[in-house]
Image (cartoon, grey):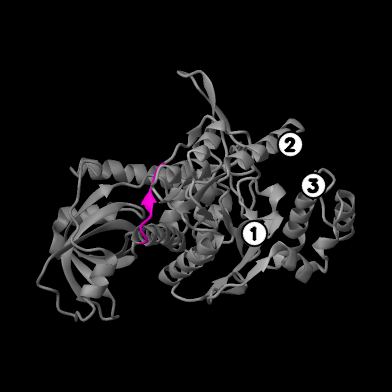
Amino acid sequence: MPEEQESDLRKQLRKNLEDMKSRGFDPYKTYRYDRTHSSTEVASQYSDIGSDRSEDLISVAGRIMAKRIHGKAGFADLVDREGKVQIYFRRDDIGDDLWDLFQTMDRGDVVGVNGNVFRTKTGEITIAVTGFQVLSKALIPLPEKFHGLQDVQMRYRQRYLDLLMNEDVRTRFIKRSRMIAHMRAWLNEKGFIEVETPILQPLYGGALARPFVTHHNFLDIDLYLRIAPELYHKRCIVGNLEGVYEIGKNFRNEDIDAQHYPEYTSMELYKAYSDYNDIMDLTESLIHDTAMQIVGTEKIVYGDRILDFTRPWPRITMDEAIKKHSGLDVSTLDTLESAKDAAREMGVREVDDCSDIGKVVSEIFDQKVQPCLIDPVFIIDHPIEVSPLAKRKRGAPHLVERFELFINGWEFANAFSELNDPVEQEQRFKEQDRLKQEGDDEAHPIDLDYVRALEYGLPPTGGLGIGIDRLAMIFTNAPSIKEVILFPHMRPDIA
């Protein structure tokens, strides 16, 4: 909309507000409004209605999104969270004062309506208005009806307007909410206990990532926004809670792209007396059941692909996956330099600074294999060097019992048989500290209190983290992670 035209419309909206008030109708005076029906409830309850008006009086509320006046009568589209219902105004039904008020209403105004239901000659279920209130007045014109709100920058910066104008966006966030609610109910039914652990932590841990740092003025100490709740959850297992989970925010000071965001939502759980095989079974069941609940099919459309969630999902070692997709036999990499040379020959970037073979193998997998993993697949048995909190693989001590779940070339879940040997855990922390001293700002710090907790005895435990945002992307066919985060961070608007 041209700037001059928008300015004129704003002036008109404010003039209409003053006209309303001069007639004794203050659109901001009402504190609450009782609704008997939503738009979908009107459609379902009165699906058999004919041209005769219903005897019962109902009330609905929402936003006027279109208005059509024909002489002494008019129609309007009222939109609420669930959809649209048509409302019919007639001067003889509502009187002169309300008729004049109807004529001064604008697109975007919030109204509450009383009336009887009938079906028009064109077959549309409609509410014949007997009375109404303007509950809030729009003072900025909404985007033009047919083109809607399409500018991505504006959609993210003014998400409230995006939700208002784009029904598919509202639906996406409703689906996200229902997805989380289903996962929570599923875990509760399995006997897990929901816990809340610190977001501000004196020592970050539970993953290899760069943290955000803040300062607590009263205690005069630096604190970190958590990168993962893992170490606190395992403290809960030491305390005999046996099965815990948490759905909440993690923070990693990293780049933003279509699949990565520094403030993201995860679901993490830990279960005593379990290993990574048990957690794989649980992960497959949880995500499959959630897909069926939210999407309703095992064949999920994402972009130009159809992702097949049919169970069971394959379980492939990282070494096997690398050989299958690149032809490289990892067992032949007997020195760090030979591993780097092999990686460079394959076009793998960023291996010069790798300090061990395991990290080179991990880079080869990330760059050459991961993009090929489209349907759900578990990649198991990772190098020990990139998994400082996982238990060694039975029969292969250079590996750990760890799996990651990949879908559409992205990582969705990460899980271990948790390391519960306090001596070995302290040794691994010290190795991570050495790497940190050498400049690795994602290395894991030494957490001596966590080691002390392990010394009291952590039972055999399986742990899991699932990225909620990426799962919501798949289940709602969203092309970017910002499409499933209500209010994403943006660079300052300098315009």
Nearer mark to the viewer, of 1 and 3: 1
Q: What secondary structure is marked by label 1?
A: loop
Q: Which mark is residue 394?
A: 1
Callout 3–callout 2 Cβ contact below 8 Å: no
Q: What secondary structure is marked by label 3?
A: loop
Q: Which mark is residue 435?
A: 2
| Mark sitting earlier along the chain (1/3) | 3
Callout 2–callout 1 Cβ contact below 8 Å: no
Q: Position of residue 119 (x, y in %)?
A: 23, 77
Q: Amino acid at mark 1?
A: Arg
Q: Which residues are magenta?
A: 190-196
Outermost residue, left side: 55
- In the picture of the structure, the residue carrying the numbered disc 3 is 356
Query: Horizontally, is 18 left or right of 319 in the view?
Result: left
Q: Amino acid at mark 3?
A: Asp
Quarter of image, res 59: bottom left
Q: Residues within 10 Å of mark 1 (few under 14, many from 20)?
A: few
Q: What secondary structure is marked by label 2?
A: helix
Q: Which mark is residue 209?
A: none
Q: Nearer the viewer, residue 163 or 364?
A: 364
| Mark sitting earlier along the chain (3/2) | 3
Nearer mark to the viewer, of 2 and 1: 1
Q: State whether residue 12 is above or below residue 124.
A: above
Rendered residue at 63%/60% (across/down): 410
